[in-house]
Amino acid sequence: MATAVEVSGTELGGNSVQERITRLERGFGDLDDPGNPLGAEQFVRADRERRILPAAENLLDGFGLNAEFVPRELGGRLEGLDALVQVMRSVFRRDASLGLGYGMSSYMSAVVVWAGGSAGQQRAAAELLLAGGRMACAYPQPAEGNDFLHNRFTTVPDGSGFLLSGRKEALNNAARATSLLLFAHSGREPDGSGGPRTEDACSAFLIDTPAPGTPGFRLLPRRTTTGTRGCLVHGLEFTRYRIGADRVLGAPLAGAGLAAQAFPVIRSAGPSMALGCADTALRTTVAFARSHRARSRASLATPRTRTALLDAFGDLLLCDALALVATRALHLLPRESATLGAVVKYLLPMLLTEMVYDLSIVLGSEAYARGGTYAAFQKSARDLPMIGLGPAGSAASRAAIAAHLIRLPALRPPTDGDAPDRPELFRPFGRQLPSLCPPEPATPTDGDSLVGSLDRAVEQARGLGGGATERALAGYATALGAELERLRRDCRELVDGHRPPVPRVYALADRYALIAAGAACLGVWQHHTGPADSLLAGPDGAVMVLARLLRRLDPATPKPPPQGVERLLAELQRRFDDARSYDLYATVIGR
């Protein structure tokens, strides 16, 4: 919904966030240049060979990417989670395997250390990352999650330490990590009768990765994956492997709480980073459509192609608006971040996977190309579904949304005064954020700031004067407000009933996720302070995004006015010509 954003990023290590992104993009170079050693052709080849491109890792080593994961007070560059996401989006735009294997796996481990580790453990993790080391993690799977193997680690006391046993079948970077974050359930030794261990609690351990051949440790064979094929995914098996008591992270038996604190962070950050992958899929499809003459069915001159491209552009902007709010809420509204993170982790993989499918219809047979000009699309189509997997994946996230609706059926803003209207929640690279402090899982909020903000945004939209686009925005905002009122009514009836059927609860969760995304979109439009000529400064961008979203809630939603269609189409082509990203930031790519 925006052209280039005026960035006033906080200075970190002498470089603003925008300057660091520009430096990284220049280092990667032109993605479409076949002569570029870091171009799309090279990443596709590396993916086909199931490896990460060494030249890309060398670039990230020189850039010091790991410093982005380390808080500033520990010597790194991490202050705002939204800024970290934007840096990582440049990596995911080239290769999701690189983004996961080099970056996200380490950050998923480090965030638990920052949340619950001792001062010594935090210093050690920071030093490891700043020296270029990697971390890997084995999170516990929530009860509502999608772990069909149900494998886990357990520990039993052994003098001043513990004996670790069990296995995890699939950990990214396990073979290359210097440090492992493991969650293990507490148990006792079998009594000799062959009965199972009793498990009652979970502890987090931060250990050095054992060397191959270490007694009690075995690195399981590498597993192949359909998407992110360059990632090194292995299993780990421990058999009475001794761990010292000083390796416990946080308090003993507090691992489940630490994981719960980390889930909102990784749920919000991971899918938001992966928007870079979706950006490449859209850019590849635009290139394909523009290469065809007007009489071709794949040309931009045909309504079907235009609709697919504009829908994809609108979905990307919608996803980014929601991701922006979720990442900034971790700083501004930490008690509400668990629900917002769950919405991001549930909705974004679903919308982006659907987006890529719709774009594949435009590409036709080229959507399956393994080489050549458009091969990056097929790679993105395989990589994107992977973001819905892992700990606290889509199934667990949907369950978390449902629990929120049962607990807060009115979906009003909080009443404790901690979350008044916060325009900085909706502004990309807004003012300096408070330190990231994952919320204690036992202190949920008593309100819903994002959805609760919709009433005021609707009022503002309805107060617009002007032409057809302004009237359309007022109509769409009113319709979204009506959807919220229906949801509130249905949630109250749900709570008043007895043991509501699960399908009904999950249907309400689906509607809530879309309404929350719409509220984020309106909030970004409402609080825009960037360039006056940007798409966000007027109603056109919001109109197109809301029209697409409301059709998901009500297929009878009126079509947007032609002016909005033409404005978004012009922006789509301008960003392609100027090599700018299709998210809120319109980042200059590769130069």
Image (cartoon, rainbow, N blue to C red):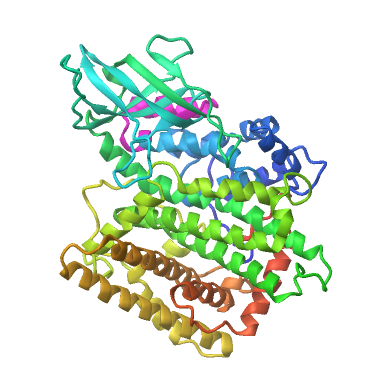
Up-down relation of residue 186 to residue 298 (above or below): above
**Residue 398, x across and y down, in percent:** 35, 56
**Residue at image location 74% in from the left, 51% down from the top:** 374
Q: Residue at x 69, y 48 (%)?
A: 376
Magenta span has 331? no
Q: Nearer the viewer, residue 557 or 337?
A: 557
Main SS of the magenta part reads helix
Q: Is residue 528 above or below residue 179?
A: below
| Residue 97 spot, x, y in % from top left | 59, 39
Question: Residue 588 in the image: x percent, y percent?
Answer: 68, 55
The region drawn magenta spans: 113-136
Q: Is residue 124 visible?
A: yes
Near-viewer residue (432 or 57): 57
What is the x, y in percent for residue 464?
49, 87
Q: Which residue lies at the image location 21% right of the left edge and 48% below the top edge? A: 442
Q: Quadrant of the N terminus?
A: bottom right
Left or right: 239 in relation to 87: left
Q: Is residue 89 above or below residue 354?
A: above
Left or right of 269, for residue 366: right
